[in-house]
């Protein structure tokens, strides 16, 4: 997006470039021709590269509101060339701030049976940096139980560290340490409440939601322990140079997503922030294969078992529903139009996620409401008139149609790059047709007409699953 804006602004300044009196005719000619040529070159940039440029604007910054706690899942590393802002990169490791202030003189707890070296490590004062992050190092102990052995990342909400849980046979856990800031501490309490309810309803972990094994308050820092999982599905996609997942992988992950979210919906809970970053592989080990069609090597994950993570924005039916939910690229039209939302909100997000898995890029590559709605119409058809009549956002419409300048730079981008959904199909074989039929039903404008996840699980697209892929057996049973 930045490159696009620079090139376009340069082109607009073409006639206003100051020229010295002694400038020669060739120099003036270069000034008149150079910028238009740059713009023409940019127009020929590969679509996927241009889409990545358009993803650098942070959703919450654009809308002038603070990022929610739910912007962060517990175990990903998101430093990637799509340049999401820091608010959307919660696990990007960075050095501790050099200027830390001592908040407590109490020492981190250490067990009497630990070695003298371990005791020395854990006896230093508890410190926060200037942003409220807990200053902790490898070798530190928390609660006489968790030994920090690695850093998994850091972000707006706090940080995530890898620990050995000495109360459970040195099992590996991911410990989410929340900043010592009131709003994040309160958000963590809400997430803990949701995780408790999920654990209560799913004691055998059959419904593929990441489970909390422990939680505690460490000197003002809410800490949540989770099972240690693999990479998130976006991180794997990014490290595979945005090569899309094979269709059998898409099918298995889609089935698991529908299974997990149906469980949440049946328990009157809406996730509200589904995206590839919040879906984690149980084990992200891969093999490298050569793709003869593309003449390149690709990573192929060995096990497509997944878990749904990040319940910081999850909302029960009886709770207050905030006006805006979901990360921009996975946000349904009823949220943009402020028509209210419920469980179908998650179904729309799943449809967007499946497209991203299948093609390697997002379906709606935008950061602005009006453009987002225009893209939806270009790809899915017209917005139903009854939704237009009901919305308070009449500024986007005139006489029942979207107000949009097709001759603007954004207008040209949408016109050139957005096409009917089926046009993105890589093959016209039956299973590809079935996938797009499922996605189209998930992407119905009217949430009342959108397919439910119980219905989705019966869709013919899933007929190709093996019995093993349909089962959800697990031996993991984290307990506090």
Image: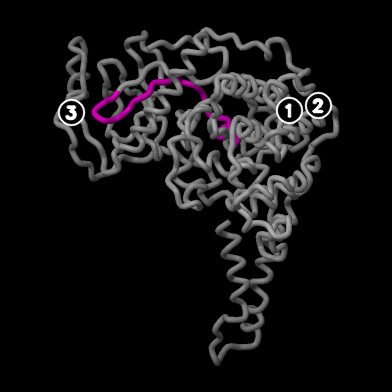
Residue ID at (75%, 35%): 440
Taking depth in this image into account, of 37 and 99 the one nearest to the observer is 99
Is residue 351 shown to the viewer in this render? Answer: yes
> Position of 93 compared to 264: left or right?
left
Q: Which residues are magenta?
A: 217-237
Image coordinates of residue 257 in percent, x first then y, are 62, 24
Residue ID at (20%, 41%): 101
Quarter where residue 423 is shown: top right
Query: Distance from label 2 to label 1 (Cα)?
Result: 8 Å
> Position of 137 compared to 374: left or right?
left
Taking depth in this image into account, of 339 and 276 the one nearest to the observer is 339
Q: Secondary structure at mark 3?
A: loop
> Position of 436 compared to 273: left or right?
right
Image coordinates of residue 246 in percent, x first then y, are 71, 28
Image coordinates of residue 428 in percent, x first then y, are 85, 34
Of the two numbered discs 3 and 2 on the same chain, state the one appearing first in sequence.
3
In the rendered image, residue 269 lying in the magenta stretch gets the answer no
Taking depth in this image into account, of 315 and 80 the one nearest to the observer is 315
**Residue that label 3 marks:** 124
Assess whether mark 1 and mark 2 are in contact (beta carbons under 8 angstroms). Answer: yes
Residue ID at (41%, 10%): 479
**Residue that label 2 marks:** 431
Query: Distance from label 3 to label 2 (Cα)?
Result: 59 Å
Label 3 crowd (10 A; few <14 / some 14-19 / many >=20):
some
Of the two numbered discs 2 and 1 on the same chain, state the one appearing first in sequence.
1
Q: Which mark is residue 247?
A: 1
Label 1 crowd (10 A; few <14 / some 14-19 / many >=20):
some
- Judge whether 295 appears above or below 18 on screen: above
Residue ID at (68%, 10%): 468
**Mark in the foreground, 2 or 1:** 2
Of the two numbered discs 1 and 3 on the same chain, state the one appearing first in sequence.
3
């Amino acid at each position: 997006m930045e490159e696009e804006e620079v090139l376009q602004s340069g082109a607009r300044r073409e006639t206003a470039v100051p020229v010295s009196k002694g400038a020669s005719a060739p120099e003036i000619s270069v000034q008149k021709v150079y910028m238009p040529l740059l713009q023409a070159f940019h127009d020929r940039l590969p679509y996927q590269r241009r889409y990545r440029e358009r993803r650098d604007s942070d959703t919450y910054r654009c809308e002038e509101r603070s990022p929610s706690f739910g912007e962060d899942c517990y175990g990903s590393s998101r430093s990637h060339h799509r340049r999401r802002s820091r608010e959307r990169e919660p696990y990007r490791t960075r050095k501790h701030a050099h200027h830390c202030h001592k908040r407590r003189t109490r020492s981190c707890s250490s067990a009497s049976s630990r070695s003298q070296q371990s005791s020395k490590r854990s006896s230093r004062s508890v410190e926060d940096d200037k942003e409220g992050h807990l200053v902790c190092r490898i070798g530190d102990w928390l609660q006489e139980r968790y030994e920090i052995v690695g850093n998994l990342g850091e972000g707006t909400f706090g940080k995530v560290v890898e620990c050995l849980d000495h109360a459970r046979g040195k099992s590996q856990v991911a410990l989410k340490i929340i900043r010592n800031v009131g709003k994040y501490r309160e958000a963590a309490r809400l997430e803990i409440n949701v995780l408790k309810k999920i654990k209560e309803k799913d004691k055998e972990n059959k419904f593929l939601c990441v489970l909390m094994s422990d939680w505690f308050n460490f000197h003002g820092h809410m800490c949540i322990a989770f099972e240690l999982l693999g990479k998130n599905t976006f991180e794997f996609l990014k490290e595979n140079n945005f090569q899309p997942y094979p269709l059998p992988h898409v099918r298995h992950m889609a089935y698991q997503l529908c299974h997990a979210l149906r469980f949440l919906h049946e328990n009157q809970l809406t996730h509200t922030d589904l995206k590839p970053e919040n879906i984690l592989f149980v084990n992200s080990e891969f093999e490298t294969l050569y793709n003869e069609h593309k003449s390149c090597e690709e990573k192929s994950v060995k096990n497509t078992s997944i878990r749904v993570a990040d319940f910081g924005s999850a909302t029960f039916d009886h709770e207050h529903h905030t006006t805006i939910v979901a990360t921009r690229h996975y946000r349904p039209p009823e949220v943009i139009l402020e028509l209210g939302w419920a469980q179908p909100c998650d179904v729309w997000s799943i449809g967007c996620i499946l497209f991203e898995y299948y093609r390697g890029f997002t379906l709606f590559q935008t950061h602005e409401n009006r453009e987002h709605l225009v893209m939806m119409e270009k790809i899915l058809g017209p917005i139903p008139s009854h939704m237009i009549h009901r919305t308070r956002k009449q500024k986007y419409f005139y006489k029942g149609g979207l107000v949009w300048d097709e001759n603007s730079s954004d207008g040209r981008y949408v016109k050139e790059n957005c096409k009917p959904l089926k046009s993105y199909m890589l093959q016209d074989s039956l299973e590809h047709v079935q996938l797009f039929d499922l996605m189209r039903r998930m992407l119905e404008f009217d949430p009342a007409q959108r397919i439910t996840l119980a219905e989705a699980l019966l869709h013919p697209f899933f007929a190709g699953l093996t019995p093993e892929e349909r089962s959800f057996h697990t031996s993991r049973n984290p307990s506090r």
